[in-house]
């Protein structure tokens, strides 16, 4: 068995394990219920406007609000994942062969992304209602969904990273939320700094603009935005792996 | 020792948690402030965050050191160095991707940001550098950025752009003459051109203009009391002139009576709010220009044709003998007629705009007139030569009176000023001008000439009207009476024959009487249904009243309940002036129907009818007959937006989203406002052939807006009024000649006052319209984006909406809660 094949298999096993772990605990159902409640609320308000012709039917406003909700949901989902691992070293016990740190991190992240993917898919009836009753721009809706899915992956990766920082779940959750909400509009800090490079970096780092300004509200899928989200994922997971490594060495 | 260690560890995490909460507080505080500016709260929260982080580190510095150096320093150091290299590699990849400038995939069906073939060809053939500077508030430039990125990619690097926040960098904005955000200035070589919004039409238009370099020529018509492009006062058009110049127009004035035709180099002709009528030759010249593919922009204030001051005959006056009478016309002339035969004796021309008042000097040698141009002119009653021109009023003069001995000439105006001249030298007397607190509409000298009375009214903040009646000593200017009687517009005033009291009339149909000695006054209701426009005193007991319905009534001045002594009818439209002859036997009236008439009070006979002043404005007629655009005789009332300014200052948020002129306003949800606007009716038979397109509407809520056709009857929607939503702006295009036209039922929207309200899109509308009107000059005609019909075509019923809401807000989450509960129960049982 090649090295790649072995890694993939390990990832698959960890993913399956983590993913199914979510659904035997009631918490994820309750988080999902909250998610659907807000989604339903946003959609009902929006649909009311579309229905009376006050606004052009689209998923832009609903998905935009849902994207902001992700900032709170993602760290809630990931907060226990790595801190638990540091404490118990579960996966060491699952395999006879040694498991690499990055495989644990990525596998856990994929598991959490799987959960949020299901959350996102649960809202698909809304655009279907729009299509049933009217003529929204389907391309715009597709781009919006693609974007929120990528955004979910990126914020979960950041959540995994902050989860690796502390063995206390609540602290991991608070740090995760603080980091995400800061990144959500880091371009607001531009007014605080001088220097074109720093303000460029802050602007470029902003989570919101890579989703809202292009995919969500304009239906434009830019390679740069995809690169941004993938880059966030790669960097966060990489740093999380390093931290897990040093923490376990110390333990 | 171990316990202390654990506690300190917990403390560290609590401190870090506090730092995280403080960070969240700061971001929320940022979100809550406009434009995400830092405030005290966010600074404090930032401080707490930094302190918390520092505390976290300082509480156990060893841990941090260990975290970095790891189990064995050397191994961990290598790991972290390698990590840094990896991070730098990812960041470098991202920067590479960014500089590759790959175009985005547009997934939308509309392909809204895809430039048309014409634009792409233009960009690909660019052989000179073009730099675009976009002035946007921070964060508002995204749409423009998407467009300009697209333009840049097609231009092979010839087109570059940058965005400037004019608040942060006012210098450059001032240098390029930009006064508002949302403007993109194209520069190439020495040329500049402005795009008014981020749409292909505007951007490509500006690109074509900056490449051609030629400014477009706009002529602004003068000669009918129009707004002046050099006038810096509130109602002037100096800022509009500046905005047009910035938008690459070369603006010049044009008097069609002098040139007799529109110059060949005209790209656009603008008629900004005429207050008097156009003569037929002028309109013929405009029509010829349009037939040749010209463009016309008309802004017209309420009041048919003649504009806000009314139409037809605006004032009448007898001479001292009563054998002649004079009439003042909205056509810009004053005429003298023979009382017996009705023959025209003299015609006085010279006023710029309507003549509003006319008066004979008591010796009959002079005639004084006042005009919409704000001047008072004195003419030789024999030759008709202009003898003197008196400035002094900043607004139109509303009444003009000689003292009975002829030594004084008094004028009152809506600028609240009373001017009194010595007729020997036409210098203001020592105590003039006198200032009052209400706009004045009428004045009268007492029969012995010792006193001058005036009346006027103003709107109050609460929506009502306060009137004022004043009496002054004509020898020294001392104020004898200042009393407020009427609760509606007061337009008529006259001393009683004995000079002891002053009568006033109001459009609500009331007659007021003021005792000069005591200064006390009272009102009685005479014609509440029709309202009184103006009146004159016949003798001690009776007066003659011109009512809102074009009838003339002789009625007792002292007994309100008495029946009419006589009712004289014949005028076809409202009577705007009435004067009793010196011998008390005749009455002369001037009407909006364009006629002046002599009535015999004994017989009730209409002995003379003059038709020297035209009732209709040639321009209004032309717009209606040639273009199917009728300027309604009304004032637009909008209750829905009344709280912003007032009921007759409609705020426009209701745009035609598909017109290139209003689409940018609609998209950016920028509102406009108009002050005293008139509605426009489109002839449906001509609508399609001339592409007549409504641009601006009043509020569409049921009963919220209407066109008030009887402004003297109070603001209430009745049968004669035009129901809303009203059209306040129209564009049209003649497919054969290529002529384009825009008509707006208001001229105040582009005045300096309006430009000084930067939160509104009035200036943007002006420039959009001017750009559209001259678009054929840009040699490019772009199709608008095909956004398709994105609507809910099968809307839910109210019940369906409720069911859907319940299903999505309650049912779906509830299902998940139940599932979660089941999982929880199952787990418990397994234990």
Image (tube, rainbow, N blue to C red):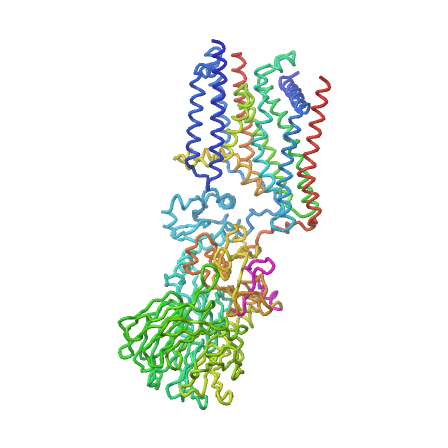
Q: Nearer the viewer, residue B827 or A151?
A: B827
Residue B738 visible in this rendered orientation of the protein: no
Residue most toward the front?
Answer: B518
Q: Is residue B687 magenta?
A: yes
**Residue B262 appears at what percent x and percent y?**
44, 70
From the viewer's perspective, is B339 left or right of B561?
A: left
Q: Which residues are magenta?
A: B685-710
What x and y, as percent, mark residue B537? 43, 81
Residue B505, x across and y down, in percent: 45, 74
> Is B211 located above or below residue B320 in the figure?
above
Query: How far from the left and from the top, in percent, is residue B430?
Result: 26, 71
The answer, for residue B130, to whether it is visible in the render is yes
* Above/below status of B792 relative to B236: above
**Image quadrant where residue B727 sits:** bottom right
> From what the image shows, is residue B828 above or below residue A219?
above
**Quadrant assignment, res B245:** bottom left
Taking depth in this image into account, of B21 and A232 the one nearest to the observer is B21
User: Is B793 left or right of B173, judged from the image as shown?
Assistant: right
Is residue A73 located in the magenta-colored stretch of the structure? no
């Amino acid at each position: 068995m090649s090295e790649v094949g072995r890694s993939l298999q390990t990832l698959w096993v960890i993913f399956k394990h983590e993913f199914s772990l979510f659904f035997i605990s009631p918490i994820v159902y309750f988080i999902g219920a909250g998610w659907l409640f807000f989604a339903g609320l946003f959609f009902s308000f929006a649909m009311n406007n579309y229905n009376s012709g006050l606004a052009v039917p689209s998923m832009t406003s609903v998905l935009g609000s849902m994207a902001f909700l992700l900032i709170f949901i993602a760290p809630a989902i990931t907060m226990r994942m790595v801190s638990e691992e540091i404490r118990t070293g579960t996966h060491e016990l699952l395999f006879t062969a040694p498991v690499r740190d990055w495989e644990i991190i990525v596998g856990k992240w994929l598991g959490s992304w799987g959960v949020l993917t299901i959350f996102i898919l649960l809202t698909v009836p809304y655009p279907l209602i729009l299509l049933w009753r009217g003529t929204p721009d389907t391309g715009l809706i597709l781009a919006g969904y693609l974007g929120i899915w990528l955004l979910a992956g990126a914020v979960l990766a950041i959540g995994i990273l902050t989860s690796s920082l502390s063995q206390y779940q609540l602290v991991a959750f608070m740090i995760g939320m603080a980091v995400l909400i800061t990144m959500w509009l880091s371009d607001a800090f531009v007014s605080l700094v001088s220097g074109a490079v720093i303000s460029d970096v802050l602007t470029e780092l902003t989570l919101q603009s890579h989703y809202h300004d292009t995919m969500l509200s304009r239906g434009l899928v830019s390679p740069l935005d995809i690169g941004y989200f993938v880059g966030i994922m790669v960097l966060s997971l990489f740093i999380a792996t390093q931290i897990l490594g040093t923490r376990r060495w110390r333990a | 020792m171990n316990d202390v260690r654990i506690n300190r560890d917990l403390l560290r995490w609590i401190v870090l948690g506090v730092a995280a909460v403080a960070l969240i507080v700061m971001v929320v505080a940022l979100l809550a402030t406009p434009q995400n500016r830092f405030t005290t709260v966010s600074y404090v929260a930032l401080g707490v965050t930094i302190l918390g982080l520092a505390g976290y580190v300082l509480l156990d510095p060893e841990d941090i050191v260990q975290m970095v150096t790891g189990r064995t320093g050397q191994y961990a150091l290598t790991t972290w160095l390698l990590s840094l290299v990896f991070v730098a590699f990812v960041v470098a990849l991202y920067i590479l991707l960014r500089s590759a400038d790959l175009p985005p995939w547009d997934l939308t069906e509309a392909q809204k940001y895809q430039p048309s073939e014409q634009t792409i060809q233009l960009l690909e053939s660019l052989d000179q550098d073009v730099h675009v500077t976009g002035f946007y508030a921070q964060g508002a430039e995204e749409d423009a950025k998407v467009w300009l990125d697209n333009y840049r990619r097609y231009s092979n690097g010839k087109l570059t752009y940058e965005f400037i926040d004019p608040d942060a960098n006012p210098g450059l904005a001032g240098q390029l003459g930009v006064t508002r955000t949302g403007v993109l200035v194209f520069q190439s070589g020495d040329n500049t051109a402005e795009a008014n919004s981020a749409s292909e039409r505007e951007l490509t238009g500006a690109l074509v203009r900056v490449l051609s370099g030629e400014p477009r020529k706009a002529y602004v018509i003068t000669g009918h009391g129009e707004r002046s492009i050099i006038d810096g006062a509130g109602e002037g058009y100096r800022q509009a002139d500046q905005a047009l110049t910035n938008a690459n127009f070369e603006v010049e004035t044009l008097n069609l009576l002098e040139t007799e035709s529109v110059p060949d180099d005209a790209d656009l002709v603008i008629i900004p709010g005429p207050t008097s009528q156009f003569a037929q030759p002028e309109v013929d010249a405009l029509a010829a220009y349009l037939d040749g593919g010209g463009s016309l922009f008309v802004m017209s204030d309420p009041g048919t044709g003649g504009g806000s001051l009314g139409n037809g005959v605006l004032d009448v006056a007898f001479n001292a003998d009563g054998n002649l009478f004079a009439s003042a016309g909205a056509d810009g002339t004053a005429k003298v007629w023979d009382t017996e035969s009705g023959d025209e004796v003299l015609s006085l021309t010279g006023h710029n705009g309507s003549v509003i008042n006319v008066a004979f000097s008591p010796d009959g040698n002079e005639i004084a007139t006042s005009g919409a141009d704000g001047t008072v002119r004195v003419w030789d009653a024999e030759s008709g030569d202009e003898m003197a021109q008196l400035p002094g009023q900043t607004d139109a003069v509303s009444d003009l009176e000689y003292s009975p001995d002829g030594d004084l000439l008094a004028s009152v105006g809506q600028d609240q000023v009373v001017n009194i001249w010595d007729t020997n030298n036409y210098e203001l007397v020592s105590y003039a001008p006198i200032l009052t607190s209400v706009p004045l509409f009428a004045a009268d000298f007492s029969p012995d000439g010792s006193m001058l009375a005036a009346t006027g009214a103003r709107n109050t903040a609460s929506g009502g009207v306060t009137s004022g009646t004043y009496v002054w000593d004509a020898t020294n200017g001392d104020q004898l009476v200042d009393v407020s009687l009427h609760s509606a517009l007061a337009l008529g005033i006259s001393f009683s024959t004995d000079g002891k009291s002053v009568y006033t009339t109001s459009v609500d149909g009331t007659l007021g009487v003021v005792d000069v000695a005591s200064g006390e006054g009272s009102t009685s209701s005479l014609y509440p249904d029709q309202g009184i426009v103006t009146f004159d005193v016949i003798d001690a007991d009776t007066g003659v009243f011109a009512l809102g319905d074009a009838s003339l009534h002789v009625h007792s001045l002292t007994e309100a309940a008495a029946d009419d002594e006589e009712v004289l009818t014949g005028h076809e439209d409202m009577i705007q002036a009435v004067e009793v002859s010196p011998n008390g036997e005749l009455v002369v009236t001037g009407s909006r129907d364009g006629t002046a008439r002599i009535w015999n009070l004994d017989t009730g006979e209409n002995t003379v009818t003059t038709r020297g002043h035209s009732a209709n404005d040639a321009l209004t007629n032309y717009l209606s007959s040639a273009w199917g655009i009728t300027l309604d005789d009304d004032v637009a009332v909008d209750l829905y937006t009344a709280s912003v300014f007032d009921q007759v200052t409609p705020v426009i948020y209701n745009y035609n989203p598909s017109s290139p002129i209003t689409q940018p306003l609609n998209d950016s949800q920028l509102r406009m406002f108009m002050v005293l606007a008139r509605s426009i009716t489109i002839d449906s038979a001509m609508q399609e052939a001339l592409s007549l397109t409504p641009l601006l509407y009043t509020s569409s809520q049921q009963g919220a807006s209407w066109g008030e056709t009887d402004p003297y009857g109070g603001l209430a929607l009745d049968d004669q009024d035009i129901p809303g939503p009203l059209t306040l702006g129209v564009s049209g295009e003649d497919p054969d000649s290529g002529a384009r036209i825009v008509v707006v039922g208001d001229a105040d929207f582009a005045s300096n006052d309006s430009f000084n309200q930067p939160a509104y899109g009035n200036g943007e509308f002006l420039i959009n319209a001017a750009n559209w009107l001259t678009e054929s000059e840009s040699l490019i005609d772009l199709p608008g984006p095909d956004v398709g019909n994105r609507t809910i075509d099968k809307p839910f019923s109210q019940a369906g909406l409720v069911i859907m809401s319940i299903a999505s807000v309650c049912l779906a989450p509830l299902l998940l809660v139940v599932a979660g509960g089941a999982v929880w129960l199952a787990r418990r049982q397994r234990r």
